[in-house]
Image (cartoon, rainbow, N blue to C red):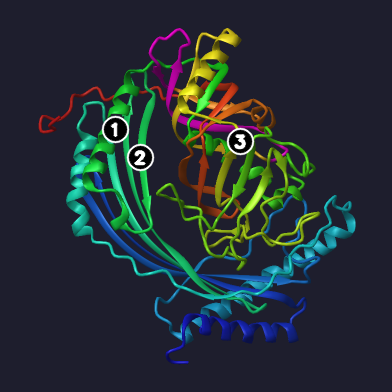
């Protein structure tokens, strides 16, 4: 097979193993898939004003999925709250060499089939003594096979070109006595995804990404660790902002850190607030997005917040939520959550999950749930994990939009109406987390960075530190009063059952009539006792 392409090599071994197992194995497989992620990454980083490292990596990893039994009941069947895991990312040669690639695929197929057969026997026996599940939908959906071949373009990245830029940025970040450590890194990545399965799917697709991350860290006099960040994303390195823009941004996050070091440590508070568009995007990602991922609606361990809410209002009637993995950019800002096909070979498509406040559907992988037999292109996974329904590009749309100035006036009115000493404005955030399972509280946390007290009597806004936004989802949604008319983008990496996947959240700013914040934990050690070295210029 000299000169054969990787899809040809994979497909030949797939057919050989599938035919043999179908004829001789008990239980026999009804579906096998081979997925390869070819990842090329180059990076350069500077720390505390000095370029510290350059790296270049290239790897190919293979995942094998084997399903035995049938679509109604197979080895992935949920039982006793157990989420099975069979595949593992194994390295294969970077060149299209048939013999070593097929040997690895053969060994992994044998291993996965043995594990699948063992669990299938176990869950079949367990089903005979267990109560019937509330949701008895199939374990795997029927989807049209897809054939597509469009590898991403080669990525051009020169660490020598970026080194002087990073020196300038790093020097700007470190130019403060309050900065204990700082770093800037630019990463260029090209990922090519290959998928072949026994249904006839043959896919070659992928993307290129360039990401620049700046971080400043410091410690307040009371021991609280503080960090400010800024991230830029683009399809390729040459489309990242220019050096002057990046140096200005570095000065901005350094200045923000300096302000936070002297800001007062605030107290717990319940009252009105505005979330900026970026903060609102994370708010929706955490408290809403995870709860409408399809498999959570049939998992008995999950809280199933919205499982019975189809056709019912779940948000204010002026809000809609769309997940659109086909959207690559918005307003000139690249979106991280786009893709052409999901990781189960289903074509990406926009999905309106909430229309005018009413829940219409869920995000679906190829795991059916009651009432939804098919995927809508949201089966996603990091290499080494089985795909489940995950978020893509979350987009909040509003029919009750006002200008930023009007939204602020509405906040002032709400502060006065509630007779509160102040309201809050959340300008920037670093991320969040949520609990969705029944055994824990149905709660969320959003971690803000830049938070201001807003006074209704005309006093200037006051920067504060040390708060987290907390709450429960249903009560929080009910308190959204209006939005701004300017959407903002938050790009990030979301970690969940199927590993880390890139996502985006797009939202206008939100006015919330009541939000709760709690004190953030802080360390007990104080800033360094010794003075800085004499050679450190500031």
The residues bearing labels 1 and 3 have C-alpha atoms spaced at a distance of 33 Å
Q: Are marks 2 and 1 in contact (CB under 8 Å)?
A: yes
Residue 342, by quadrant, is bottom right
> Circles 1 and 3: CB distance less than 8 Å?
no
- In the image, residue 352 lies at what x, y percent? 65, 49
Left or right of 250 in this view: 491: right
Marks 2 and 1, the one that precedes in the sequence: 2
Alpha carbon distance from label 2 to label 1: 9 Å
Q: Position of residue 32 (x, y in %)?
A: 65, 75
Is residue 369 placed above or below 272 in the rendered structure? below
Q: According to the image, label 2 marks what residue?
A: 230
Q: Residue at x 56, y 52 (%)?
A: 392
Q: Position of residue 375 (x, y in %)?
A: 68, 61
As drawn, is 499 to the left or to the right of 183? right
Q: Outermost residue, left direction?
A: 535
The magenta stretch is 437-465
Q: Earlier in the sequence, mark 2 or mark 3?
A: 2
Q: Residues within 10 Å of mark 3 (few under 14, many from 20)?
A: few
Question: Residue 122: in sight, yes or no?
Answer: yes
Instruction: Specify the quadrant that holds the C terminus.
Output: top left
* Mark identifier at residue 399: 3
Name the residue carrying label 1.
Answer: 252
- Decide if residue 526 is in sight here: no
Q: Residue at x 65, y 34 (%)?
A: 318
Task: Please say if 476 is above or below 388.
Answer: above
- Mark 2–mark 3 contact, CB under 8 Å? no
Q: Residue at x 73, y 62 (%)?
A: 374
Does the magenta segment cover residue 454?
Answer: yes
Closer to us: 288 or 180? 288
């Amino acid at each position: 097979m000299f000169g054969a392409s990787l899809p040809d090599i994979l497909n030949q071994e797939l057919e050989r193993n599938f035919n043999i197992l179908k004829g001789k194995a008990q239980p026999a497989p009804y579906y096998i898939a081979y997925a390869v992620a070819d990842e090329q990454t180059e990076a350069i980083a500077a720390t505390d004003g000095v370029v510290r490292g350059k790296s270049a990596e290239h790897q190919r990893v293979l995942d094998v999925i084997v399903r035995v039994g049938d679509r109604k009941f197979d080895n992935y069947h949920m039982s006793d709250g157990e989420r099975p895991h069979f595949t593992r990312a194994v390295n294969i040669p970077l060149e299209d060499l048939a013999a070593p690639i097929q040997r690895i695929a053969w060994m992994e197929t044998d291993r996965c089939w043995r594990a699948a057969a063992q669990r299938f026997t176990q869950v079949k026996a367990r089903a005979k003594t267990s109560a019937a599940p509330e949701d008895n939908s199939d374990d795997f959906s029927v989807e049209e096979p897809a054939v597509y071949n469009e590898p991403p373009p080669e990525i051009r990245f020169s660490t020598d070109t970026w080194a002087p830029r990073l020196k300038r940025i790093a020097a700007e970040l470190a130019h403060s006595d309050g900065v204990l450590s700082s770093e800037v890194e630019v990463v260029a990545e090209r990922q090519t995804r290959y998928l072949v399965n026994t249904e006839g799917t043959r896919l070659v697709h992928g993307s290129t990404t360039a990401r620049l991350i700046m971080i400043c860290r410091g410690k307040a006099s009371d021991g609280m660790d503080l960090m400010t960040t800024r991230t830029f994303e683009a399809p390729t390195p040459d489309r990242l902002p220019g050096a002057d823009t990046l140096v200005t941004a570095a000065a901005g996050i350094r200045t923000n850190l300096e302000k936070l070091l002297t800001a007062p440590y605030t107290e717990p508070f319940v009252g009105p607030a505005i979330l900026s568009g970026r903060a609102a995007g994370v708010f929706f990602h955490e408290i809403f997005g995870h709860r409408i991922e399809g498999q959570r609606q049939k998992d008995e361990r999950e809280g199933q917040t919205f499982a019975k809410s189809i056709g019912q209002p779940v948000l204010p009637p002026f809000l809609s939520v769309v997940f659109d993995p086909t959207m690559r950019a918005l307003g000139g800002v690249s979106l991280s959550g786009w893709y052409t096909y999901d990781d189960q070979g289903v074509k990406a498509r926009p999905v309106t999950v909430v229309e005018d406040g009413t829940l219409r559907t869920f995000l679906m992988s190829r795991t059916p749930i009651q009432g939804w037999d098919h995927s809508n292109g949201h089966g996603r996974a990091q290499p080494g994990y089985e795909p489940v329904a995950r978020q893509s590009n979350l987009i909040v749309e509003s029919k009750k939009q006002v200008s930023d100035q009007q939204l602020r006036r509405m906040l002032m009115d709400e502060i006065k109406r509630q007779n509160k000493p102040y309201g809050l404005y959340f300008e920037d955030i670093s991320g969040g987390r949520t609990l969705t399972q029944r055994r824990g509280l149905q709660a969320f946390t959003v971690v803000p960075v830049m938070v201001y007290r807003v006074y209704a009597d005309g006093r200037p806004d006051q920067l504060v530190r040390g708060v987290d936004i907390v709450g429960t989802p249903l009560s929080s949604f009910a308190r959204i009063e209006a939005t701004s008319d300017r959407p903002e983008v938050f790009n990030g990496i979301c970690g969940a059952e199927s590993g880390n996947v890139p996502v985006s959240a797009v939202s206008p700013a939100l006015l919330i009539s009541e939000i709760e914040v709690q004190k953030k934990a802080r360390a007990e050690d104080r800033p360094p006792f010794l003075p800085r070295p004499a050679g450190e210029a500031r």
